[in-house]
Amino acid sequence: MEILSVALTVAHLLAVIAWLGGMIFHIVVLDPVFRNNEVSFQSAYLLALMEARFRKLVGGAIALLLATGVAKAYLLLGGTREALGNTATGRYVLLKAGLTAVMLVIFAVCPKTRSCSSIPGVCEVAAEGLLSGKTGTVRERSKVVLPKIALGLGFCALVAAVILRG
């Protein structure tokens, strides 16, 4: 049983790293570059390709995160529902589940997760930019509030996990 618990923890942490790490990269690196600089259509096209690939990675990471989280909670709580509300461990599990649920809602409504980018002009560039031979620049002016909130919630979930492991 210990091997299963370790394997679930490793898979769970890898999923968290993929999701939160990707969010950090987008918020700290990509978004400021597009917000503060003129970017060529070719660069915007490459960003659109990167975002499409990132959405696929995050989708898989979320599925893995949910599956391993449920399995870990089951093992941690001894398979009883009563332990969810009646123990400190159960309450931390509920806290992590709630934070993750809010992050999932943000992920579902955030423009970066849809078929197109939140960066103005990237959608058109992705569709025709390199293929039509367009040149020029695209400047992104959008704010990235929802991903920052989701990232903060993710860090709260990590703190809850550390406290849970105490």
Image: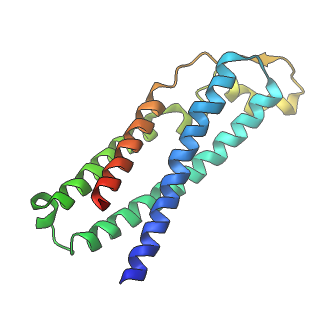
Residue at the bottom extreme?
A: 1
Position of the N terminus by quadrant: bottom left
In x, y percent, where is residue 39? 77, 21
Looking at the picture, does residue 3 appear above or below residue 97? below
User: Horizontal placement of 154 versus 92: left or right?
Assistant: right
Q: Residue at x 65, y 43 (%)?
A: 52
In x, y percent, where is residue 131? 86, 33
Q: Residue at x 12, y 58 (%)?
A: 85
In x, y percent, where is residue 104? 40, 45
Position of the C terminus by quadrant: bottom left
User: Horizontal placement of 53 versus 6: left or right?
Assistant: right
Residue 144 in sight here: yes
Q: Nearer the viewer, residue 76 or 120?
A: 76
In x, y percent, where is residue 103? 39, 42
Rendering colour mode? rainbow
User: Horizontal placement of 80 versus 105: left or right?
Assistant: left
Q: Quadrant of residue 124?
A: top right
Q: Residue at x 65, y 40 (%)?
A: 51
Q: Nearer the viewer, residue 128 or 71?
A: 71
Residue 127 in sight here: no
Give the tally of numbered discs.
Answer: 0
Q: Quadrant of residue 164?
A: bottom left
Residue at the right extreme?
A: 133
Q: Residue at x 26, y 70 (%)?
A: 76
Looking at the picture, does residue 95 appear above or below residue 25? below
